Image (tube, rainbow, N blue to C red):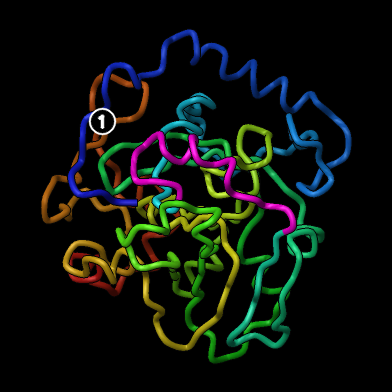
Amino acid sequence: MPFLRPGDIRPSEITPAAVYRDRRRFLGAALAAGGALLLPSALPAAPRRFGPLPRSPLSTSEPPNSYKDITTYNNFYELGTGKDDPARNAALLKTEPWSVTVDGEVERPGTYTLEDILKPHALEERIYRLRCVEAWSMVIPWVGFPLGDLIKRFQPTSRAKYVAFTTLHDPEQLPGQRRNVLQWPYVEGLRMDEAMHPLTLLAVGLYGEVLPGQNGAPLRLVVPWKYGFKSIKSIVRISLTEQMPPTTWNRAAPHEYGFYANVNPAVDHPRWSQKRERRLGELRKRETLPFNGYAEQVAQLYSSMDLTKWY
């Protein structure tokens, strides 16, 4: 999610070298937990780890950020606007039971439990870069499955051109929704070809564990070539539509946040440059890559578009 001004990361937020060294060991321990794949409802309170997971060939070879980086430096305004608010308030978010309504231009609409949503799908680990519109970035080992596989199950009609997503709206569980910093509930959208692209993931975990509340439990979107605010969290509705759906940040500031929000170092935010980024845990800034480094896989989706207009 964007905020009003991009700030440099404080020295206290930079990951120590020892944490980096422990990263692989932690992941190995999580995967070595063994046993059959565990769905959230079947897991004990803590720790809640999945069994061994295959790593997707679509993963980057870049080293992931630490679990601490990923779970304590968050934008999830529903749980608070500060970077540490989501982790502090995450216990308020109750993810069991959970259901997702699928409707609109599909042949099989309905409201499905999370278990029904997940059951037919094999989970895998996908290590993706994440680039925030605020000009910081991370590398995250997600656990999930392709969104396109889920959409096919509900049989889109020929009129389906877009996919709209809605976050849980419950100010009792999400105290950030008690403030009018944005119009609630948070909504997002993708074009159908974006939603069906193999890189587009529905995530239910990270680092081999069930997704923490501050990262969008129990089910969130991950679109690695777009700015992070497109990857909506805590999804309760997926609607296929004929018309382009509204999106929260575009509604809040349409001159700053477009529908597409592809990572593009050639198109600056109106109030700051997007040419460079600061990877959490690194002292020096690095060059931002077009489409966050996924241009080879996705640039053709926008070959006929002026990306200075369709930002």
On screen, residue 70 versus residue 58, left or right, reads left
Quarter of the figure that contains the C terminus? bottom left
Q: In front: 77, or 133? A: 77
Residue 199 in view in this figure: no
Q: Which residue is outermost to the top?
A: 18
**Count of numbered circles in the view:** 1
On screen, residue 134 versus residue 299, left or right, reads left
Is 182 above or below relative to 4? below
Q: What residue would you read off at disc 1?
A: 286
Residue 22 location (% of width, % of height) = 57, 13
* Residue ID at (50%, 28%): 64
Residue 21 location (% of width, % of height) = 53, 11
Badge 1, how many Cα within 10 Å: few under 14, some, many 20+? some
Residue 101 location (% of width, % of height) = 65, 74
Q: In front: 193, or 188? A: 188
On screen, residue 12 versus residue 145, left or right, reads left
* Residue ID at (72%, 75%): 111
Q: In which quarter of the image is residue 23?
A: top right
Residue 198 in view in this figure: yes
> For the magenta stretch, what is the residue range?
79-97
Residue 24 location (% of width, % of height) = 60, 19
Q: Which residue is outermost to the left?
A: 271
Whether residue 95 appears in magenta in the rendering, the answer is yes
* Residue ID at (54%, 91%): 159
* Residue ID at (45%, 67%): 185
Whether residue 193 appears in magenta in the rendering, the answer is no
Is 251 above or below relative to 22? below
**Kind of residue indicated by mark 1:** Arg
